[in-house]
Amino acid sequence: MLTRIDDGHHRMRYSRMATTTSLAVKAGALSAAALLALTACGNGDDTDDTTGDGNGEAAGEALTIALFGEEPYSWIDEATGEPTGATIAVAEEIFGERMGYDITIEEEPEWGNLIPGLSAGHWDVVSAGMSINAERCAEAAFGEPELVYTTALLVEEGNPHDVHNFEDLADADLDVIALSGAVESGYMDEVGVDHDTVDSADDGIDFVQGGRADVFALTAISLETMAGDQDGVEVTDSFAHELSVAPTPSVPTTRSCSRSSTST
């Protein structure tokens, strides 16, 4: 376990487990102020408890954040061994700097375990590039969206099968994969694309590079970041898939769960 001291205000403990956009928060796990802090950050608002001095109402309380390895959202930097990425920066700023939580970050290698682990109490917050949809809103509260992203396909260099979206895949006899539990898998079910799943983004890239799959569907920003410059593969132009999200009254959610989102 790696420990560092940040500005004397709070301690960030990095727990190393087996190797793995909005923040998902276990319903009821945090005070209302924690959820409000997420919303305020998204809107650019400020509150008395978000001064950035680490002395908010949660000062010194423990908070565990699950990290999933998918660039550029959150991953372990191989050079330093420390968590990094856009969603990690947001979590550290809000929960650590502003609210004063004593944060532990744990790496979870399987995407499909993130929300179940949240529900089971293994961690309090998920830091990942996670789309907001009705099924997830029934199990977790989401902060304000941090970005809007689209889908792309990782294919063999030259795109020999000329596929550019889910509809193309539905008409092709190809070996297609997606992350287990990711929205891309659900989209392909809707369109009628026969596909298998893998547990991590790295696995998906390896499958296409190694010839074990023809296509890997993932967010465009992740594929460009992780595989855009790798030999033998290419990332198609991005495309959008619209998903209507209904509010879930039984769960304390932010406005993110009550409106439609375009995501992957």
Image (cartoon, helix red, strand yellow):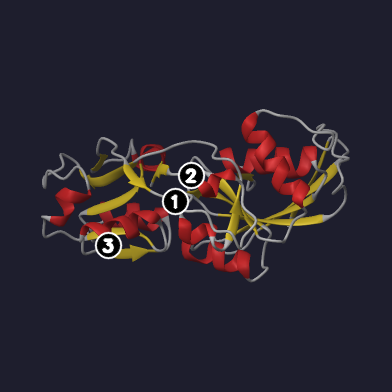
The tag on residue 16 is none
Please name the residue shown 72% across and 41% down the image: 37
Query: Which quadrant of the figure contains the N terminus?
Result: bottom right
Please name the residue shown 79% across and 38% down the image: 98
Query: Residue 101 at x, y = what percent?
Result: 80, 49
Q: Secondary structure at mark 1?
A: loop
**For the residues marked 2 and 3, what is the alpha-carbon distance in whole angstroms?**
23 Å
Q: Badge 3 local density, few (<14 within 10 Å), some, or many (20+)?
A: some
Q: Nearer the viewer, residue 189 or 112?
A: 189
**Disc nearer the start of the sequence (1/2):** 1
Question: From the viewer's perspective, is residue 36 above or below residue 19?
Answer: above
Amino acid beneath label 3: Asp
Which residue matches tag 3? 189
Q: Badge 1 local density, few (<14 within 10 Å), some, or many (20+)?
A: some
Which residue matches tag 2? 259
Amino acid beneath label 2: Arg
Judge from the rendering whether residue 65 lies leftward or rightward of residue 70; answer left or right: right
Which residue matches tag 1? 245
Mark 1 vs 2: CB contact within 8 A: yes
Question: From the viewer's perspective, is residue 209 above or below residue 148?
Answer: below
**Nearer the camera: disc 1 or disc 3:** 1
Residue 74 in sight here: no
Query: Residue 135 at x, y = what percent?
Result: 47, 61
Judge from the rendering whether residue 98 lies leftward or rightward of residue 221; answer left or right: right
Q: Secondary structure at mark 2?
A: loop
